[in-house]
Amino acid sequence: MTDAGFTHLDDAGNARMVNVAGKDQTHRTATAKGKVNMAPDVAKAIAADTVKKGDVLGVARIAGIQAAKRTSELIPLCHGLALSAVTVDFELHDDHVEITANAEATDRTGVEMEALTAVNVAALTVYDMCKALDRSMTITDIALWEKTGGKSGTYRRST
């Protein structure tokens, strides 16, 4: 670790992957959430399953799970993890979709990035599938809500 406390930098300030070989494997979980804000008619079309591209939330769920599994390919310094579970769930409201992703693994490093990646890609998929109905949709409020396991223990976001 450098003097500034950044573990992804070597002593010369160059980016590096953190060596986790000396860490214990522990059970780790993470929950991330985010929102896709949209016009009410788009939310109604999703609820009625009348979006021409198909089952918006079903496709977004698969996209989010797939993205969690490929996080280390997308985020350069992330370790590849053997995920034991990933879930992506949706709560449809009058003018937005709330997305919740949970990731779980027994490994040497946390699964926060996997949960966050799942939410981001699920949100992008909702946007992609509904953009013909509303190009002004916004993806907002993506954040880590909880993580457990590892040296730093449990974190819970205060709302």
Image (cartoon, grey):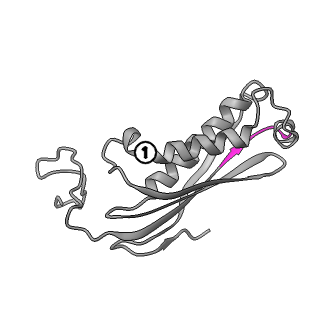
Mark 1 sits on what residue? Answer: 71
The image quadrant where one finds the C terminus is bottom right
- Asked if residue 67 lies left or right of residue 34, the reply is left
- The span picked out in magenta is 35-40
- Asked if residue 96 lies left or right of residue 80, the reply is right
In the image, residue 34 sits, relative to residue 44, either above or below, namely below
Q: Amino acid at mark 1?
A: Thr
Q: Is residue 139 at least partly visible in the picture?
A: no
Which of 50 and 38 lies nearest the eye of the viewer? Answer: 50
In the image, residue 4 sits, relative to residue 120, either above or below, namely below
User: Could you say which quadrant of the image residue 76 lies in?
Assistant: top left
Which residue: 21% across, 62% down?
A: 21
| Residue 138: percent from left, percent from top | 67, 39
Number of numbered discs on residues = 1
Residue lying furthest top: 132
- Asked if residue 2 lies left or right of residue 98, the reply is left
Is residue 20 rendered magenta in the image? Answer: no
Q: Secondary structure at mark 1?
A: helix
Q: Is residue 23 at least partly visible in the picture?
A: yes
Which of 35 and 56 lies nearest the eye of the viewer? Answer: 56
